[in-house]
Image (cartoon, rainbow, N blue to C red):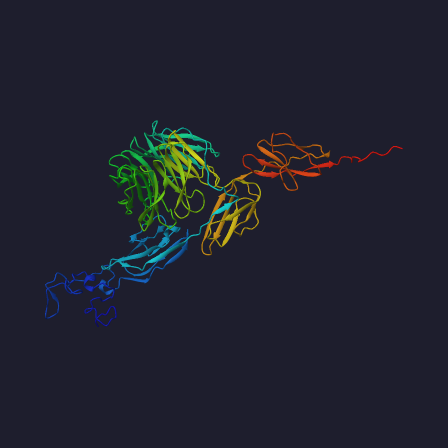
Amino acid sequence: MANDTDGDLAPDHYDFDSDADGCLDVIEAGFTESLTNPGELQGTGYNATNGTVTGGVDGYTTPNDGDSNGTFDFQQNDIVINTQPLNQAVCEGDNVSFSASVSGSGLTYQWQLSTGGAFADISNGGVYSNVTTNTLNITGATQSMDNYQYRLVTSSTAFVCGPVISATAILTVDSTTVAIAYGTPNPSLVLTEQTPLANVAGAYSVYAIDMDGDGDTDILSAGYQGGGEVNWHENNGSQSFTKHTIDVCGGARSVFAIDMDGDGDIDVLSACRAGDEVNWYENDGFQGFTKRSISVGLNGANSVHATDMDNDGDIDVVAGSSFSPHEILAFENDGSQNWTVHTVASGFRQAFDAFAVDVDGDGDKDVVGAGSLDNEVAWFRNNGSFGFSEITIDASANGSRAVYALDMDGDGDTDILNAAYGDGEINWYENDALVFTKRPVGNTNEANDVYAIDMDGDGDIDVLSAGQQGSGEMAWYENNGSGSFSKNTFDNSVSDASSVFAIDVDGDGDLDALSAAVIPNEVAWYSNDLLNPQCEGDIQFEEVGGDAITWTWSTDGSATFDNISIQNPVISGLVDGEIVTVTISDGTCTSTTNVTMAINPLPDNTFTLSEETICDGETATIMQSGSTLGVTYQLRLDSDDSNVGAAVAGTGNAITFDVTPTVNTEYNVLATDDVTGCTVELTDLATITVNPLPATPTSLPLLV
C-alpha cells in the first residue's frame, strides 16, 4: 500500500508536501526544484514509459535523512511547536521563564528579544540564562524590561526549510515606588561647601566609593598638572580626609573605581592624557595599589569608564581620546585582565568623554560619546561581539564635552545627557524607540561635565553640572517631575570647575555633591541637608511613594511604633544610626526601602531650679544648678510657655534668671542646643511665691 504520511489521501509519491510541514518534498529530499513548476524536479522533459524527469541534475538518489533516524526528511514533520510561549507578568526583581514545547529531532534553539524594533538573538549573561534551550530564564526582571517581547527560533538538521519561529510572548514588569519622608523636611535643598580636600594640582576628575570597606565614602581625584596625580582620599568616618597618591602618570584627566578582578576589593582606573595611558591599579585588599597597563597608545587619553560590556561576568573598559586619530576604544577583558582592543570610533574628533550603557535594551553595553570638535553627541551600537556602528544623536552640541546616560523620564529606556562647552548648554535627549529628541536642562558658563541622579528624593531625576571659565560654577537643576528644570547654583567661587559627582558622603541618608576644579587646584564636597537631622523623641514618618495599599515598618534596633501597618506611623526611641525600613505592596508587587537615621541627642534636662519667696515688688533670682556650654536656656511662664526675659547662654556652671512677678508664679526652662536646634524642657519647675505688702491705712485714728 502506498505511503500517505500526512493522511490527506494523497499518496506520498503524488504529494508535493508529504508531511504537511510547509516544506516541499523535493527540497527536503535534497534535490533541485524546478524553476517554473514549484514542487517538481528540475528537468527538461519526462520519460513517457516510467514518468521520470529527464534532463535534470538529480532526483533519483536516496533522499536526505538529516537526523539519521531512518525516516526520510520529507516524510516526517521535523519541527512542531506543541505549546507556544505565554505572556508573563511579574513584579520588578522577580525571576521569570518563557517556555515552548517543541517536538522533532535534531532540534536546536535560540531565544530572541525585541525591545520595540527588530528581534535579535539573546546571549547568556546578565539577567538571561538557558538562551539556547526551549526554556528561557530571566533572573531579576527590571522595570526597563517592561513590554519586552520574546520568541523562540527552532532549527533542525532534518528541516532544510527552517527555522520555525514561535509566537511572540510579552513580558510585563510591575514596579512599585516606595519612598520615606520623616520629620520636617527643609523647604529646599541646600548644598553647603565643607572643608576642601588636600590640594590636587589641576584637579580635573572626581569620583567616590567606599575604597577600604569601612562603611564610609572615600573620594578619588585626578589632576593633570604637577605631574598628573591619581589619588584616593580616605574618609575617617567623620568626613576628615587623608590624601593617598596612587600614581603620577602624566596629565591625569579621568578616574574611576570598580572591582576589576573580582577579588572583592575596589580597584582604580585612570586616563592619563600626557602619557597616552589607560591604567588600572590593583588593590591588594589593604589599599596598596599595583599599576597595570591597559593601553599606552591612546593619543590624548581623556576619559575612562568600566563595566561588563558583554555580560561574561568580568569588567571591560571604554576610553576616549582628545587627539588624532580621535578614537574611542573598548578593551575586552578575558577574565584574567588581558585585554583585546576594539575600535568603537575613529575620527570622532576630540572624543572628550565615553560612557558605556545599554542604549537599545538588547542586553549588551553600547557606548555614548561626546565629540568636541565636531559638536557631536553620538551612540555606538554594540552588535554583541564588540562590533560598533555610529548613530548621531546631535551634530550641533557646540563643543560637546561630556555625556551621561540613564532613564531621565521613568519610561523604562535609556536617555542621554550632554554638556556643551561652546554655548554652555546642558541638554538631555529623550529616547523614544531610539529616536532622540533634544530637551533643555539649563545653561552654565562653558559646561564641562554633567551628572544626573535624584538629588532631592522626590522620585524624579535631577541634573548637576560643572562650568569652567569666568567665575566657574557648580549647579544642580531641579526636575519638576515633568522634565522641566530650575537651576540652583551652589558654588560660583571656583574657576575652571571640571567635574561633578553626587553620593552620600556623610552617611546621613541624602545625596551630597562633589567637585573638581583646576583653579584653585581643589576637590571639594558639599553637604546636603535635605532632611533636618532629627532630635531624640517621637518622630513622625510617612511612606510617600504613592503606590502602596499596605505597609510594614521595622527597624534594626529597639525603637517602637504606634502602628507598624499604617502609612504614617510615629516612631519612638530611635537612636543615631538606627535603620528604619518599610515594605509596601500595591496588591500585586512589593518594594522595600530604608533610611539610616541621624539622631541628635537632647540637651541635659536634669538641672534643678531654686524657689524663692518675695514681697510684692521685689525681684527674685532663680538659680539653675548647672548648664552646658553650647546650650541656650530660656525662662518661660509655665502657664503658657511664653518667654520671660532674654535667653541665657550656658557656661558650664550655674546660671541665674531674674524675675519680678506680682502673683505666685511657676516657671520652666527650655534648653536649646545651639548647633542641632534640639530642645527639651527641664524637668524641674521654679515656683516664686509673692507675699502682698501690708495694707496702708487710709486715715489716722483720733487722739482723745
* Image quarter of the C terminus: top right
Residue 85's quadrant in the figure? bottom left
In the rendered image, the vertical position of residue 158 relative to residue 625, given as above or below: below
Q: Residue 351 at x, y = what percent?
A: 29, 38
Q: In the drawing, does residue 267 fall left or right of residue 506? A: left
Q: Is residue 62 left or right of residue 359?
A: left
Which residue is at a point 45% across and 56% down the rendered structure image? 588
Residue 458, horizontal then vertical, whole percent: 45, 46
Count of labels shown? 0
**Residue 72 appears in view:** no
**In front of the other: 651 or 175:** 651
- For image coordinates 39% across by 46% down, the residue present is 484
| Viewport quadrant of the N terminus | bottom left
Q: Residue furthest right?
A: 704
Please name whichever residue, 313 or 478, is drawn nearer the observer in this view of the structure. Answer: 478
Measuring from the top left, give residue 187's x and y in whole percent. 49, 42
Quadrant of res 313? top left
Q: Position of residue 574 (x, y in %)?
A: 55, 43
Residue furthest out toward the top: 226
Answer yes or no: is residue 499 visible.
yes
